[in-house]
Amino acid sequence: MINIGDIDLGSEILVGIDYCGYIVNINDLNVSEEVPVIVIGKYYYGEMCIGWNNMLLLKRVGRPTDGSSNSWTSFPEKYFMIKEAKTFQFHTWIEPKTIVKLYNKIIHPNQKCVCCNLPAPHCNPNMPDNKFQCVCCKVLETLG
């Protein structure tokens, strides 16, 4: 289990859902279901964005992605989003301290961040030529 704020963009995770359909820490006693989603973005204040396509998942907290994606592209200094963020039908923003589980499906066993060289086998490439850059390095790069 890990804080979602410590997870790289593009990672597949499991979020905890309580009996009312709201996102809670995955280790909370009220968790009734674990739902797979993708971390698709990070706001410059730290909130993390998750995305999914099944309308029945997280129906209480989900918003359609169509209208929101314009803000993401209009303010790239505030929204750090994966390239495929617009392709998800639904999304929501959650606090960076929310505890989630990594969905440990190894996608690219030999993948590493092109900047810090740390392994990232559970993430999809987020750069041209099927390369990967972790969110920490991406933020540091934008700061100059």
Image: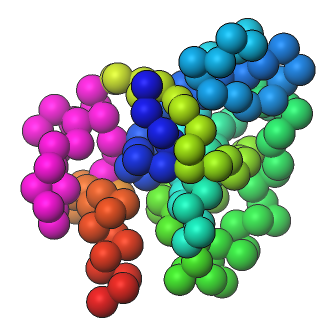
Question: Which image quadrant: the N terminus?
Answer: top left
Tell me where residue 72 sits by quadrant.
Answer: bottom right
Question: Which image quadrant: the C terminus?
Answer: bottom left
In the picture provided, is 30 more to the left or to the right than 112? right
Q: Is residue 117 covered in magenta?
A: yes
Q: Is residue 33 covered in magenta?
A: no
Tell me where residue 130 sits by quadrant.
Answer: bottom left
Instruction: Determine whether 123 is above or below 140 in the image.
Output: above
Tell me where residue 132 sits by quadrant.
Answer: bottom left
Instruction: Determine whether 37 is above or below 65 in the image.
Output: above
Residues shaded magenta: 106-125
In the picture provided, is 106 more to the left or to the right than 73? left
Query: Of residues 144 and 50, which is closer to you in this image?
Result: 144
Q: Residue at x 34, y 23 (%)?
A: 105
Q: Answer yes or no: is residue 12 visible.
A: no
Q: Residue at x 70, y 67 (%)?
A: 69
Instruction: Determine whether 143 is above or below 19 in the image.
Output: below
Q: Residue at x 65, y 18 (%)?
A: 28
Which SS type dominates the magenta stretch?
loop
Residue 84 spot, x, y in % from top left = 52, 56
Residue 3 spot, x, y in % from top left = 48, 39
The single residue placed furthest to the bottom in the displayed view is 144
In the picture provided, is 125 more to the left or to the right than 84? left
Q: Answer yes or no: is residue 61 visible.
A: yes
Query: Of residues 53 and 135, which is closer to you in this image?
Result: 135
Residue 131 spot, x, y in % from top left = 22, 57
Residue 53 spot, x, y in % from top left = 68, 36
Query: Of residues 1 and 112, which is closer to you in this image?
Result: 1
Q: Residue at x 89, y 20 (%)?
A: 20
Tell me, what colour scheme is on the image? rainbow
